[in-house]
Amino acid sequence: MLGGVFHAAVLFLAAAGLQLVFGVQKILNLACGSFYALGAYFGVSLVTWALGAGVPPSLFLGVLILGGVLLAVIGPPVERLLRTISDRDESFQLLLTFALVLMFEDVIRFLWGTAPHQLGSVYLLYGQLKVGALTIPVYNLVVIAAGATIAAAVGWLLTRTRFGRLVRAAAENPRMAEALGIDLARLYSRVFTLGVALGTVGGALVIPATAAVNEMGIELIVEAFAVVVIGGLGSMRGAFAGALIVGVLKAVAIATYPEVEMLAIYVIVIAVLVLRPAGLFARAAA
């Protein structure tokens, strides 16, 4: 169960970036999975370099988060590209962002090759916690706490700051916001970069517990869109609830009937589509 919450914490970060971009810019961004994969690969490289340069191993978590934040530099140029189709039909957005997914896969193969990359033993560097018969890696608890902290920080940013008020105004009525003097191009660039950072940090945080493989971006897209359907497109609260449902359900399925791991998730997705097509938290503010 705790493994499911760990997976939910990472999945929430990637899905939150997808939700944020759609909620404000109305762009269905399949490339969110590529940002997640890039964050994982870059995290492996940066931690390996940092440990080789003499950085204390106990600081690897900070290095991973720093790597995810630094990688958000790819956000503005990608946003400029996607801005050209932001007012087009959603099929154009899906086609272009899927093309980006394929291009980023080639970039990963070019920079890191096709072999899996992993961080070795750092996953257990923070020790393990014994609770009865259970042994829980402390790193899992740290990532869950980090995910909750980032979620709270994003919520504070969107509801308690001037930037958040501008974002909500642009999401509600972009023409009115622009007429009132808000620089939408600059605002959209910042929002998209924030969405990229959430995805890259999510990918960086998961990598001590698994290996970076080229297909991990596609797998993340499948789960992220399940989260979006369950929670409701454009809803941050929906992203949180959807990630928790998908993460825990996946963990329970793997522990009981691993053959139906994805089937269990998509039974819930179909049920939500039939009973509540707009999602459990439809039309919540971004």
Image: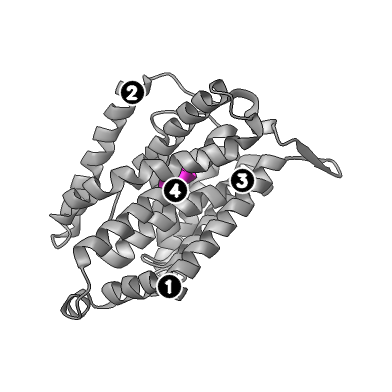
Instruction: Give the crowd class for mark 4: few <14, some 14-19, many >=20 residues within 10 Å.
Output: many
Q: Which residues are magenta?
A: 199-203
Q: Of residues 64 and 9, which is closer to you in this image?
A: 64
| Residue at image mark 3 | 251
Q: CA distance from mark 3 to mark 1?
A: 37 Å
Q: CA distance from mark 2 to mark 4?
A: 26 Å
Q: CA distance from mark 4 to mark 1?
A: 31 Å
Looking at the rendered image, the disc whose residue lies closer to the viewer, 3 or 1, is 1
Looking at the rendered image, the disc whose residue lies closer to the viewer, 2 or 4, is 2
Q: Earlier in the sequence, mark 2 or mark 3?
A: 2
SS category of the residue bearing label 3: helix
Furthest residue toward right: 132
Q: Earlier in the sequence, mark 4 or mark 1?
A: 1
On the rendered image, what quadrant is the C terminus found in?
A: bottom left
| Residue at image mark 1 | 161
Q: CA distance from mark 2 to mark 3?
A: 32 Å
SS category of the residue bearing label 2: helix
- Which residue type does callout 1 highlight? Thr
| Residue at image mark 4 | 223
Give residue 89's position: percent from left, percent from top. 15, 60
Q: Earlier in the sequence, mark 2 or mark 1?
A: 2
| Residue at image mark 2 | 111
SS category of the residue bearing label 1: loop
- Which residue type does callout 3 highlight? Ala
Instruction: Give the crowd class for mark 3: few <14, some 14-19, many >=20 residues within 10 Å.
Output: many
Instruction: Give the crowd class for mark 1: few <14, some 14-19, many >=20 residues within 10 Å.
Output: few
- Picture quadrant of residue 31: top left
Give residue 197's position: percent from left, percent from top. 40, 49
